[in-house]
Image (cartoon, rainbow, N blue to C red):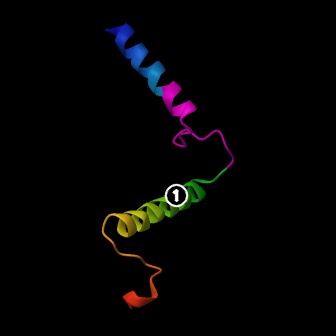
Amino acid sequence: MKKKVALFLAVFVGAATLGGCTLFPPTSESPKAIWRSWSKDVGEMQKFTDKYFLNYDYDDPFNE
């Protein structure tokens, strides 16, 4: 059981580190900057989903 837990933790930490995870930031960025970056990415994902899957384009001048 201990080996399974140790293996899981090793894989999790390795994947988080190599995947660029910012949950354990070794950087000097403030948490506010990280949240701002995440919220910007979420907004871009929402616009992409609306444009290509729901057929609504925010930049279309004829939608007003």
- Foreground of the two, 47 or 51: 51
Work out which quarter of the rendered image holds the N terminus and state it.
top left
Picture quadrant of residue 56: bottom left
Residue at (50% x, 59% y) in the render:
41
For mark 1, what is the residue? Answer: 35
Q: Is residue 27 left or right of residue 46?
A: right
Above or below: residue 17 compared with residue 42: above
Residue range of the region highlighted in magenta in the rendering:
13-28
- Foreground of the two, 41 or 63: 63
Where in the figure is residue 37, as x and y percent of width and height? 55, 58
- Foreground of the two, 25 or 51: 51
Main secondary structure along the magenta-highlighted residues: loop
**Outermost residue, right direction?**
28
Q: Name the kind of residue labelled 1 in the image.
A: Trp
Residue at (53% x, 35% y) in the render:
19
Q: How many marks?
A: 1
Residue at (37% x, 65% y) in the render:
52
Above or below: residue 47 compared with residue 5: below
Disc 1 packing (10 Å; few <14; some 14–19; many ≥20): few
Work out which quarter of the rendered image holds the C terminus and state it.
bottom left
Is 24 within the magenta?
A: yes
Is 15 within the magenta?
A: yes
Where in the figure is residue 54, as x and y percent of width and height? 30, 68
Above or below: residue 26 compared with residue 50: above
Q: Is residue 36 left or right of residue 8?
A: right
Dot 1 falls on a residue whose secondary structure is helix
Picture quadrant of residue 34: bottom right
Where in the figure is residue 45, as x and y percent of width and height? 43, 60
